[in-house]
Image (cartoon, rainbow, N blue to C red):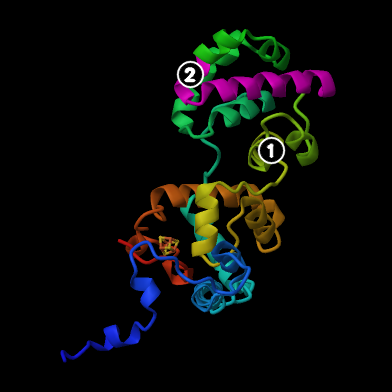
């Protein structure tokens, strides 16, 4: 008699081998579908339980992967002596630092700052003389024809959104402030299209009221210099306010913007030639030149 394989010896139920033969029900009076739903059949039950176990293992695995994330260390405020050294060095480096936007009054600076979003200051300065010659005040800008305004500011990019912002902002300046640009952060940020950054530019440069402008350069340098670990611009601004003397807020923004453009560039900062290097912990810098 030929020897059976171990698998053949295990198959003891002959009905399962009959072509077209009905397989026995798992329990009297219960269909296989019902059994599948309830998981009564040992094999089906084991499949369902296995799936549940796999799902729970997977959930547990996700939990395990998420759990070991290192807790963010509490940020220690910078040493005041180091901050003073940084400020003195920055003042020596950029004694004449100011905004590169050309303007004659607060309204021109406000409009130029709106136009400078995603655009260079040089490009804005090429556009604004013709713009302000044709529309010399807030009322004229608010009443400008959309197509005419769009055509004038088109070179600055995003001209449709900027046209909407300028017209709406100027209409609010006329209706709420008698055509004069307001002088407080709250009133400025309440205007259409004016955020804290734009408001602080206007306050600091047109009214001489100190304000810290946090753009991409200021945020990046503040983190590299270990003055804050915040990423959100408003949180960066609030972190810098207590560590920089108030009278230097506006100039400090200009210093960091210039240093960020010339030396501490986003990719591969020029640490080897940077005069701030002795006071800079270079937080997050992995590659430099
Ligand atoms: S030392 Fe490097 S990281 Fe620090 S400010 Fe200078 S260029 Fe930037």
Between 8 and 180, which is closer to the camera in this rendering? 8
Q: Is residue 179 visible?
A: no
165 within the magenta span = yes
**Residue 188 coordinates in the image, percent (x, y):** 75, 34
> What residue is disc 1 on?
199
Q: Is residue 155 visible?
A: yes
> What residue is disc 2 on?
154
**Residue 110 coordinates in the image, percent (x, y):** 65, 29
The residue sitting at 39% across, 73% down in the picture is: 15
Q: Distance between the Cα atoms at labels 1 and 2?
A: 23 Å
Between 81 and 126, which is closer to the camera in this rendering? 126
Q: In front of the other: label 1 or label 2?
A: 2
**Residue 114 coordinates in the image, percent (x, y):** 60, 30
- Answer with mark 1 or mark 2, whichever residue precedes in sequence: 2
Q: Callout 1: few (<14), some (14-19), or many (20+) C-alpha neighbours within 10 Å?
A: many
The part of the image, by quadrant, that contains residue 87 is: bottom right
Report the magenta residues as a range. 152-179
Q: Is residue 58 above or below residue 207?
A: below
What predominant SS class does the magenta segment belong to? helix
The residue sitting at 70% across, 46% down in the picture is: 210
């Amino acid at each position: 008699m030929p020897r059976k394989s171990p698998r053949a010896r295990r198959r003891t139920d002959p009905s399962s081998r009959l072509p077209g033969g009905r397989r026995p029900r798992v329990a009297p009076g219960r269909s296989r579908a019902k059994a599948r739903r309830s998981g009564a059949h040992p094999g089906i039950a084991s499949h369902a339980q296995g799936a549940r176990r796999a799902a729970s293992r997977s959930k547990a695995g996700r939990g395990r992967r998420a759990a070991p994330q290192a807790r963010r260390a509490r940020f220690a405020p910078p040493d005041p002596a180091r901050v003073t050294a940084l400020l003195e060095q920055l003042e020596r480096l950029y004694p004449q630092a100011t905004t590169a936007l050309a303007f004659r009054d607060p309204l021109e600076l406000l409009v130029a700052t709106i136009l400078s979003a995603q655009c260079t200051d040089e490009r804005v300065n090429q556009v604004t003389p013709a713009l302000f010659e044709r529309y010399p005040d807030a009322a004229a800008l608010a009443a400008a024809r959309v197509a005419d305004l769009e055509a004038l500011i088109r070179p600055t990019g995003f001209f449709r959104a900027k046209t909407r912002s300028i017209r709406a902002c100027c209409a609010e300046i006329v209706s709420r402030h008698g055509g004069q640009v307001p002088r407080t952060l709250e009133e400025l940020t309440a205007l259409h299209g004016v955020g804290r950054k734009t408001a602080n530019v206007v306050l600091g440069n047109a009214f001489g009221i100190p304000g810290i402008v946090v753009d991409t350069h200021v945020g990046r340098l503040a983190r590299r210099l270990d003055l804050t670990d915040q990423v959100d611009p408003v949180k960066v601004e609030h972190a810098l306010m207590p560590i920089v003397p108030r009278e230097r807020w506006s100039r400090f923004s200009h210093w960091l913007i210039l240093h960020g453009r010339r030396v501490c560039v986003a990719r591969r900062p020029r640490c080897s030639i940077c005069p701030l290097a002795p006071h800079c912990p270079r937080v997050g810098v992995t590659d430099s030149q």
